Amino acid sequence: MTLHDVVRFIHLLSIVLWVGSLVFFSFFAAPSIFKVLPREAAGDVVGDIFPKYWAVGYVSSVLALATLVMISLMEKNFPAVRVLILSVMTAVTFYSGLSVGTKARAIKAEMRAAEETSAKEELGKGFKKVHAISSALNVVIIVLGVALVFFTSRSMRL
C-alpha cells in the first residue's frame, strides 16, 4: 500500500463518514427522536447531539480538503469542482455550527430562563427563524455532499 493509497482512503473515509452522518441524522435519527419523545425532551437530545454532529463535519471537512490537495499534488491534477464543493461545504458547516448553532443554544437557554409567557413566545419565534436557517444550511450541505460523492466516484480509477 502506497502513500497515495492511504491518502485516497482517508479522503474517501472522511467524505463517507461526513455525508453518511448528515443523511442518517437528518432523515432517520432526528425524526425518530421527535416521534418517540416529548417535544422538549427531543429538543434536548438533539441539542446534545448537535455539537458532535458539527464536530464530525469540522474534522471530516478539513481532512477531505487536505487529502484532496495532497491527491491533486500527487496526481498533478486540480479537481476544481470538487475543491469548490468541499470548500463551500466546509464554510457552511463551520458557519452553521459556530454561528447559527451558538445562536440557537443561546435562545434555548433564554427560553428556559424566561418566566413570562410573552417573552417565551417571542423567543420561540426567534428560535424558529434560527432553526429554519439551520435546516436550510443542512440541506445545502447534504445536497453538496451527494454531489461530492458523485464527482469523487467519477474521478476514481479502478
Image (cartoon, grey):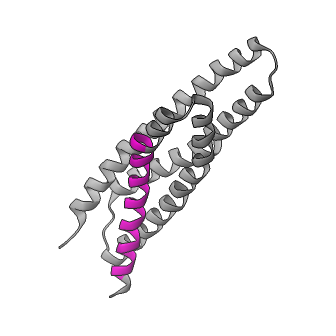
Residue closest to the far left: 158
The overriding secondary structure of the stretch rendered in magenta is helix
For residue 69, above or below residue 56:
below
Q: Work out which residue is located at the far bottom of the displayed protein and give it.
A: 1
| Region rendered in magenta | 4-28
Q: Give x and y (percent) for residue 17.
A: 42, 60
Q: Please name the residue shown 43% across and 64% down the image.
A: 14
Which residue is located at x 57 percent, y 29 percent? Answer: 39
Q: Residue at x 50, y 34 (%)?
A: 34
Q: Does 119 sit left or right of 148 as displayed?
A: right
Q: How many marks?
A: 0
| Residue 33 lies in the magenta stretch | no
- Residue 120: percent from left, percent from top: 73, 18
Tell me what residue is drawn at x 61 percent, y 50 percent: 51
Locate residue 77 relative to residue 25 in the image: left or right.
Answer: left
User: Residue 125, position in %: x, y?
Assistant: 63, 18
The residue furthest top is 118
Quarter-of-image position of residue 123? top right
**Which quadrant of the view contains residue 64?**
bottom left
Q: Nearer the viewer, residue 70 or 15?
A: 15
The N terminus - image quarter: bottom left
Residue toward you, 81 or 15: 15
- Is 55 drawn above or below residue 32 in the view shown? below
For the C terminus, which image quadrant?
bottom left
Q: Is residue 66 above or below residue 120?
A: below
Residue 89, image x and y in percent? 45, 49
User: Which residue is nearer to you in this view: 21 or 15?
Assistant: 21
